[in-house]
Image (tube, rainbow, N blue to C red):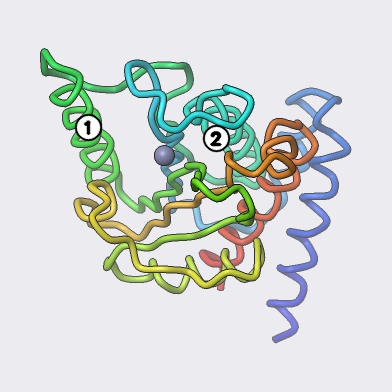
Amino acid sequence: MKRKLVLKLSYILTILLTLALVKAGNRAVTVISQGLPVHRETCFIIDPGHGGVDGGATSCTGKLESAFNLEIGLRLDDLLRFLGYQTKMIRREDISVYTQGDTIAQKKLSDLKERARICNETPGAILLSIHQNTFPDDRYSGAQVFYPATEGSEELAKLLQSNLSQRQAKKAQGVYLMEHITCPGVLIECGFLSNHQEEAKLRSPEYQKALCCIIAATAAEYVED
Ligand SMILES: [Zn+2]
């Protein structure tokens, strides 16, 4: 119990230091992260949803979902690497990762197959798929976490959901990636692009950082427990 508490405190401290050190550059960050106990066999696959030919949803101010996903994914990657974890980014720019196909539909399917392949071929993989929600009624807001049937996913989804918002984690239905991975994973809809207040928050670097701190700290808690 004592060890767990110490671990938890060290992560909280690390996250706070990360925020303070983001401006100090990578060197300071690397030095501090070397002292942390981490599961080196874990590799977080960070999947900024959509990209390239597939922009995903469009926000109420006209920004594409793929752009929100990439910004948040890159911040999450920085934080998890800072904590000492191996990571793999599915994409680091505005591209689709398809390998074949002529039509947009074929390219989209090839892109999803490629994302699943990367997850399934990476030892110790845990997928963190980043998306944004939209709904015709603009009242709705809040992060929503989905999970596949793979072992450990529901536990991670529930932990994340309880740290992010008051919604309930849900089993993913008809989501290609969630149905084709063999590793644990979650799909995080960070917020509603159809809600004006939430969309404005999701566009701000400060809110993105806070969101990523919660996701990274929860992911760390999940693998270290
Ligand atoms: Zn999406």
Image quadrant in which the C terminus is located:
bottom right
Task: Give how far across and how far down residue 13 sits, in percent.
Answer: 83, 56
Which residue is pictured at 11% across the width and 18% down the height? 101
Q: Is residue 19 left or right of residue 126?
A: right
From the image, tell me which residue sits under label 1: 114
Of all residues, the one furthest to the bottom in this rendering is: 1
Residue that appears at 51% across and 57% down: 39
Left or right, 84 with reference to 118:
right
Q: Nearer the viewer, residue 36 or 213?
A: 213
Percent position of residue 102, x then y: 11, 13
User: Which residue is found at the position 77% from the left and 72% from the top?
Assistant: 6
Exactly how many numbered labels are in the figure?
A: 2
Q: Residue 157 vs residue 2: left or right?
A: left
Q: What element does badge 2 sit on?
A: helix
Residue indicated by mark 2: 73
Q: Nearer the viewer, residue 217 or 174?
A: 174
Mark 2 or mark 1: whose residue is earlier in sequence: 2
Q: Is residue 144 above or below residue 67?
A: below
The correct choice, above or below, for 27 with respect to 53 in the image is below
* Rendered location of residue 182, percent (x, y): 23, 57
